[in-house]
Image: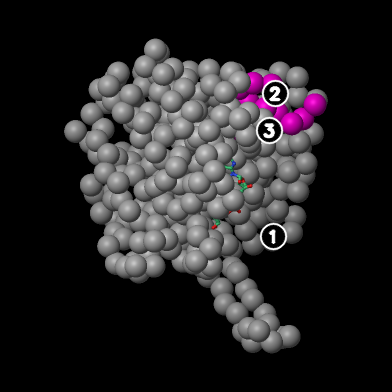
Amino acid sequence: MSSLAVIPGDGIGPEVMAEVLKVHAVVEDVFGTGLKTEVLPWSADWFLEHGDVGIDVLAVRRDHAAVLLGALGDARIPDNRHAIRIIGGLRQQLELGVNLRPVRLRALAHCPLKHVTAVEDVDLVVVRENTEDVYVGVGGAVRAGSPAHVAMEVGVHSRWAVDRVVTAAFELARSRRRRLTLVDKSNAMPSAGPLWQGRFRAIAASYPEVECDHLYVDAAAMELIRNPARFDVIVAGNLFGDILSDEASMLAGGLGVAPSASYDPEDGSFAGVFEAVHGSAPDLVGTGRANPLASVMSYSMMLGRLGLREAHAAVERAVDEVLCGDLLTPDLGGTARTGDVGDLICRAVARH
Ligand code: NAI
Ligand code: MG
């Protein structure tokens, strides 16, 4: 029997994770996936009480087949040290270099763009490099607090990490509509630009069936709104991928329905970390307004990556059904509560 590590985290993390665990219990009943769960209490509370003692990222991979993560972020830890230690630790120490962020419209009403007239027009995946760029913590500041304060945040891009994520993006594009767009800012980034461009072209040679395309990130931000149907798979560095995926999520209803998967394509035994794109949403805590679907959809991506096809398909159908109905949380214009949506998913999976 394999094990899932469950990190509910902070804010709405535990609220949405409770719904995922309800769904998992039904999936277990119906499909017998043999996945038991172990809750890891790593959160802001944990950090304030114990520091990082007991936070052992490598043990997670040793003991578990995958991680389900709620969200991390708490105003009591303003520099986000605990989230960087836990999420950053998982991504970097476990080499989870590929972050998939799919955006698929399930009901036309959830798209805020009047010119989108078919759900098929919004069906894309942002493939984000997950370990480098300006998130590596390389930099420094001098004369902080004075008028002469200077800060540097260095973007790191290695050939091997670029190769890993670009290859994963080509593989994904090949299994979808066979169109891959590289997004960068090579016109203004003369060091990182040629590395991404050169490796993209080199790897493209092995995928002649995939149509390649390139956009600068500023133009890509605009094109996502102007003509989302032009996108199938987008590959980008860590910073641009982060920003574009939040933007793209709005095309399908926003952060409440934006899932993600982070994984190491070369690790056959550990499936990765599966978490909603959103954060801990302190404005929603305790209100029952948090949409659990982003976390349920992340759980579904995990089932897919673990090869549990039937269970994955059943949860996907349940999500489709709920998103096409009218029992929705307030972010999608409804009045349902977090637990109502979780219950609906459970019933739909049970009926699969
Ligand atoms: P956020 O994603 O928590 O919230 C942004 C907006 O989206 C808010 O208006 C919120 O109400 C709404 N929202 C988020 N999740 C929702 C859901 N499930 N249903 C309905 N509406 C939802 O981002 P924000 O406010 O910038 O950050 C809050 C905290 O979360 C910060 O401490 C931040 O560092 C942390 N954070 C953590 C992430 C993670 O755990 N991977 C990712 C992003 C932020
Ligand atoms: Mg983000």
**Who comes first in sequence, dot 2 or dot 3?**
2
User: Alpha-carbon distance for marks 3 and 1?
Assistant: 29 Å
Q: Is residue 347 above or below residue 276?
A: above
Amino acid residing under circle 3: Leu
**Who comes first in sequence, dot 3 or dot 1?**
1
| Mark 1 element type | loop
Residue 110 placement (x, y as % from top left): 67, 27
Residue 311 placement (x, y as % from top left): 36, 21
User: Alpha-carbon distance for marks 2 and 3?
Assistant: 10 Å
Q: Name the residue tied to disc 2.
A: 109
Instruction: State yes or no: residue 109 in magenta.
Output: yes
**Residue 120 as seen in the image, left or right of residue 21:** right
Q: Name the residue tied to disc 1.
A: 189
Magenta segment: 103-114
Q: Nearer the viewer, residue 227 or 298?
A: 298
User: Alpha-carbon distance for marks 1 and 2?
Assistant: 39 Å
Amino acid residing under circle 2: Ala
Q: Is residue 12 above or below residue 24?
A: below
Residue 240 visible (yes or no): yes
Q: Which mark is residue 251?
A: 3
Mark 3 within 8 Å of ligand 1, using the beta carbon: no
Amino acid residing under circle 1: Met
Residue at 50% across, 60% down: 74
Q: Nearer the viewer, residue 35 or 219?
A: 35
**Who comes first in sequence, dot 1 or dot 2?**
2
